[in-house]
Image (cartoon, helix red, strand yellow):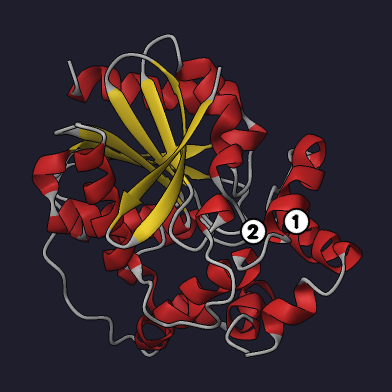
Amino acid sequence: MVRHKTVAVNGADLHVARRGSGPPLVLLHGWPEFWLTWEPVMARLADRFDCIAPDLRGFGRSAVPGTGPSDTVGPEVHADDVAALLGALGIARAGIVGHDVGAYVGQALGRRAPERCAGLFFFDCPYPGIGPRLGRPDNLIEIWYQSFHLKPFAAEMVSSSREACRLYIGHFLRHWSGPNPGAFDDVLEDFVDTFLQPGAMQGGFNWYLSQQAGRLAMLRGESPALPPITVPTCIRWPEGDPLFPYAWTDRLPEFFADLDLAPMPGCGHFPHRERPDAAAAAIAGFFGRVMA
């Protein structure tokens, strides 16, 4: 049974979904997602782990109505929220699982508070080593949305009707699922309901406003040098992700000192939805080792 609660951290009220018992795992979603994206994995891990899936600040039920565009909610802010959430829940140390935006947040947490991280596990992992490849001509058709989300009218346009929201959010859930385009069909209306909540669409778009300077630096090949993360890290990168090709894993060892990297076949951008059995097994296997 999934339990829901609201936890006040750093001036924000975070919605948190929780299921299971055992060593704690914090599951950090990407865009266009919220806690529900993790439900299949939570169901498969609940007999071994305490699965804690927050809606990041501005996303899902953690959205704040009427705040408007903001460029102040980058990965460090979210990482500090996660650290504060652990404190509020009385958890000294947890395994951190991240995907997409959540992988950015997990990296920031691994640098800012490594003592809070028993290990880091990422599906896909946007990182500075991708560099100018992000904007190569044949990839522009995939990253166009990141520029669109910067427009002051974007959130209002996409949430102007239920059909507009369904078309927009549904496009990414289907297209990025690669070989498994129906992975979110059973929860698509739940996603539409969530993103139509006041503030939720703009809250998600604010991630891109907050990341724009870093994205431009990456496109120019000018991302700042960062010391490698020392927390043990496992990355399972899908082979069929149309957004982040597996070839982009080549520089990961420069950014993670203790890295377990392997491809994940048969899925696109959302392994936790497309292949939940394999995703849960990979998570359990890694944290079974590092948290033993």
The number of discs equals 2
The residue drawn where x is 41% and y is 79% is 210
Percent coordinates x, y for residue 157 in the rendering = 78, 80
The residue drawn where x is 53% and y is 61% is 63
The residue drawn where x is 41% and y is 88% is 216
Taking the image as shown, residue 5 lies to the left or right of residue 38, namely left
- The answer to whether residue 63 is above or below residue 54 is below
**Amino acid type for the residue under numbered disc 2:** Pro
Please name the residue that numbered disc 1 is placed on: 175
- Residue 268 seen in the figure: yes
Q: Residue 270 or 221: which is nearer the viewer?
A: 270
Q: Residue 186 or 227: which is nearer the viewer?
A: 186
Local packing at callout 1 (Cα closer than 10 Å; few below 14, some 14-19, many 20+) is some
Q: Secondary structure at mark 2?
A: loop
- The answer to whether residue 105 is above or below residue 144 is above
Residue furthest right in the image = 163
Taking the image as shown, residue 255 lies to the left or right of residue 279, namely left
Which one is closest to the eye, mark 2 or mark 1? 1
Contact, mark 2 vs mark 1 (Cβ under 8 Å): yes
**Amino acid type for the residue under numbered disc 1:** His
Q: Secondary structure at mark 1?
A: helix
Q: Quadrant of residue 243?
A: bottom right
Percent coordinates x, y for residue 115 in the rendering = 9, 42
Q: Which mark is residue 280?
A: none
Local packing at callout 2 (Cα closer than 10 Å; few below 14, some 14-19, many 20+) is some
- The answer to whether residue 178 is above or below residue 12 is above
Please name the residue that numbered disc 2 is placed on: 242
Taking the image as shown, residue 151 lies to the left or right of residue 4, namely right
